[in-house]
Amino acid sequence: MRVAIVERLDKEEEDKPFEVTYYLDNYYKEIFDKLDILLIPVISENRLEEVCSLCDGLILTGSSNDVHPKYYNEEPIKERTYDRFDEYPFVKKAVEIFNKANKPILGICAGIQELNVIFGGTLNQLIPNHSLKKYNIDRHEIKIKKDSFLYKVYHTENMEVNTYHSQSVKEVAPNFTVTAISSDGVIEAVENGNIVGVQWHPEALKDIEFFDKFFKTFVK
């Protein structure tokens, strides 16, 4: 099996030699090596149709670059700045191509936010108490909806996930269902057929079962 994975994008500090970097956390390598799934890195919109034809699914790993509110018809709030590299158009094109081919798409952290905006939803530009501490330590409880993909994975309605984000889904995109929510009301997962988005980082939890079940469930 081959899976396309959009690399994380970050802007280096001014004193660093490289202005913008694409990278993939080692968690993904460890998990997908064990699953014997070949990851195909994606960092450009060039030849995405060819990438789609080669791959069985798509993963959006998210990034520290928030989706600009202009893409969901809102103005930036004073507390947020959006001066980093804009990757949204490229991610949107990748999602549209894989969706048209009816291939599964998984969005993680900022990936769920990108998916929600691409399909017509909006975001909370800033949420309290969930932001950017070491995500293997700080955790919170979520409630999972029965009859969802997540429930089939974990067989429970309650579990703890890591906390590592500063934005979240606000208005859910049409045709998507909320399938997990945090104890303080933050939307933690959405699903629409073979498209799944989660707000936490299952790769950092080394949750191999999550990824295994996703591709075994949705790859035809």
Image: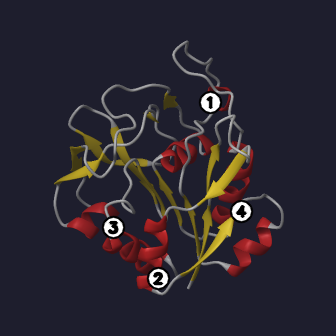
Up-down relation of residue 81 to residue 23 (above or below): above
Task: Assess whether mark 3 and mark 2 are in contact (beta carbons under 8 angstroms).
Answer: no
Residue under numbered circle 1? 72
Name the residue tied to disc 2. 33
Going from the N terminus, do you reach mark 1 or mark 3 first? Answer: 1
Which residue is denoted by mark 4 in the rendering?
97
**Residue 216 to residue 161: above or below:** below
Q: Nearer the viewer, mark 2 or mark 4?
A: 2
The residue under label 3 is 206
44 horizontally vs 25: left or right: right
Identity of the residue drawn at 30% across and 29% down: 129
The relative height of residue 75 versus residue 59 in the rendered view (above or below) is above
Q: Secondary structure at mark 4?
A: helix
Report the amino acid beneath label 4. Answer: Ile
- Per the model, the C-alpha gap separating discs 4 and 1 is 20 Å
Q: Secondary structure at mark 2?
A: helix
Separation of disc 1 and disc 3 at Cα? 33 Å
Upstream in sequence: badge 2 or badge 3:
2
